[in-house]
Image (cartoon, rainbow, N blue to C red):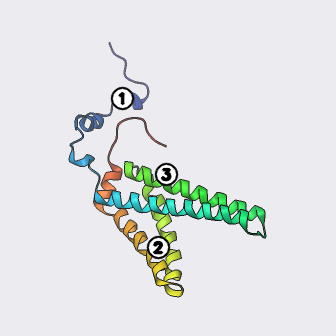
Amino acid sequence: MSRPPVNPAEQPDPGQRDHAAHGPNDVSAHRPAGVYVISVVVGLQAVALAVLGVVATIGAFSQPSLSVAGTVFLIVLVFALAAALAAVAVNAFKGFRWTRSAAFVWQLLMVALAVPALLNGPAVTGLVMLLPALAVIFYLFTPKVVEFSLRPRGGQPVL
């Protein structure tokens, strides 16, 4: 005589068997082109921030600073943002759903920075910041990318 589980979470998920039976050739397991665009653009933005952090670090040692604490804070902030964007790029490629909101917020910030640069500064700088951000925003909301990020996965849940 079997005893029913005390915790409903102990019951097996019938949906996991269906997805586990599909092999790597399953159509739903393929990454849409938008996922590649999002991952590459956000990854390049992370690399650009890391380069900016290196330049700021070199500048901190070679030029006088009004506030050493402010300079160190900004350098740490730039490297932290670069690491966070790199994590977003990698996990967006894997299909985690939390990356869509993080990438969207960062792209909105890029648009907010690009518009004044486009209107008051060199147009090339504004376009380099604006066009990739708009491409990422577009692809974040395409049905295939949303479906890819919402697909069920087996294994341990991620917080």
Looking at the rendered image, the disc whose residue lies closer to the viewer, 2 or 1, is 2
Which of the two discs, 2 and 1, labels the residue nearer the N terminus? 1
Q: Amino acid at mark 2?
A: Met
| Alpha carbon separation for disc pair 2 and 1 | 49 Å
User: Residue 17, image x and y in percent?
Assistant: 26, 33
Residue at coordinates 28% horizontally, 38% vertically from top-left? 15
For the N terminus, the quadrant is: top left
Which of the two discs, 1 and 3, labels the residue nearer the N terminus? 1
Q: Amino acid at mark 1?
A: Gln
User: Residue 70, image x and y in percent?
Assistant: 74, 64
What SS does tag 2 mark?
helix
- Which residue lies under the disc numbered 1? 11
Q: Is residue 145 left or right of residue 79?
A: left
Q: Amino acid at mark 3?
A: Ala
- Which residue lies under the disc numbered 2? 129
Q: Is residue 61 left or right of residue 155?
A: right
Residue at coordinates 41% horizontally, 70% vertically from top-left? 132
The residue furthest front is: 62
Q: Is residue 134 left or right of residue 86?
A: left
| Alpha carbon separation for disc pair 1 and 3 | 33 Å
Which label belongs to residue 48? none
- Which residue lies under the disc numbered 3? 87
The residue furthest bottom is: 120
What SS does tag 3 mark?
helix
Residue at coordinates 46% horizontally, 41% vertically from top-left? 158
Crowding around mark 3 (Cα neighbors within 10 Å: few <14, some 14 to 19, many 20+) is: some
- Position of residue 85 relative to residue 7, above or below, is below
**Hey, which quadrant is residue 25 in on the image?**
top left
What SS does tag 1 mark?
loop
